[in-house]
Structure formats: C-alpha cells, structure tokens
C-alpha cells in the first residue's frame, strides 16, 4: 500500500459521518463518506476502500445487507468491514459476523481504540490476513 489507506465511512447521520470522517482523516487515512447503503455500495466500487466503517441502522438497506452485498461483489478479504454502530447486543454482533463483517465496534467508540483498530486492520492487510484484532 504505497498511498495512505482508504477508509469509507457509511453513516446516515450527518454529524456522526462528518465527525468520524474528520477523526479517521486525522489518523492519516484517505477518507470518503456515503450517507446510505446504496451510496455505500456505489462508493466501494468507485473508491476501492481498504476498510469500510459501516453503521447498521441505515435508512435504505441496513448495514448487514450492505455487508452481504459487498462480500458478494468482493469475495476476498478486502475491504475489511467494521460495524460502527450503537447496536451492541450479542445478537447484533452475531448478525454482523454472519453478514461477513470482520469486527463490530459500539458507538460511541474511544478515538484511541478506533485508531488502534484501524492500524491493526491496515497492518493485517499488508500481511494478507483478514483479522483486525
């Protein structure tokens, strides 16, 4: 990865999308934002992100369906999919795993933890390993 890693933030709430994107960009990543699932799926095709931070409660298709669609279109380990959601029950985490999401973090997430997660994901991408933690 010669350029900075690309992170797509899929989030329907404007303030949360902007804050997350600014934070991720401050960590040194090239950042893109999509505000719903359909736009997120299109952005994956256009920007070829290394990592997708996706909200689960999107207005058109939920984050789990978005993850399944991304996995069908990209059956490898890229992009790494991280659920970034307020939904943190065991059933939500299990549903994320079943949808092909690599990691589930609950909002609000500590910025230091998010930075560590992203660094681990990028490190593992470079090693051709799918896991983030």
Image (cartoon, rainbow, N blue to C red):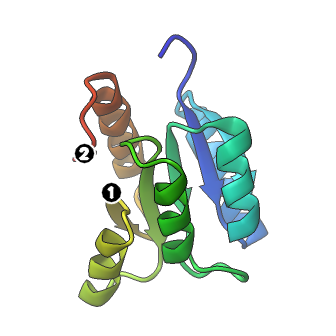
Secondary structure found at label 1: loop
Determine contact: label 1, label 2, CB under 8 Å: yes
The answer to whether 8 appears left or right of 27 in the picture is right
Residue 66 lies, in percent from the top left, at 57, 68
Q: Residue at x 43, y 41 (%)?
A: 78
Residue under label 2, please give it.
131
Residue count near mark 1 (Cα–Cα under 10 Å), binned few <14, some 14–19, many ≥20: many
Q: Quadrant of residue 54?
A: bottom right
Residue 35 lies, in percent from the top left, at 75, 65
20 above or below 100?
above
Q: Residue at x 47, y 16 (%)?
A: 1
Q: Residue at x 47, y 79 (%)?
A: 86
Secondary structure found at label 2: loop
Residue count near mark 2 (Cα–Cα under 10 Å), binned few <14, some 14–19, many ≥20: some
- The front one of 74 and 88 is 74
- The front one of 31 and 25 is 31
């Amino acid at each position: 990865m010669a350029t900075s890693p690309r992170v797509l933030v899929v989030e329907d709430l404007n303030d949360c999308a902007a804050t997350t994107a600014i934070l991720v960009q401050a960590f040194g990543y090239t950042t893109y934002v999509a505000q719903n699932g359909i736009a997120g799926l299109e952005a994956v095709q256009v920007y070829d992100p290394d990592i997708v931070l996706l909200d689960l409660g999107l207005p058109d298709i939920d984050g789990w369906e978005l993850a399944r669609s991304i996995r069908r279109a990209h059956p490898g380990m890229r992009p790494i999919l991280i659920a970034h959601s307020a939904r943190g029950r065991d059933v939500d985490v299990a549903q994320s795993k079943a949808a092909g999401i690599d990691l589930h973090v609950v909002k609000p997430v500590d910025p230091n933890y998010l930075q560590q997660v992203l660094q681990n994901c990028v490190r593992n991408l470079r090693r051709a390993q799918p896991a983030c933690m």
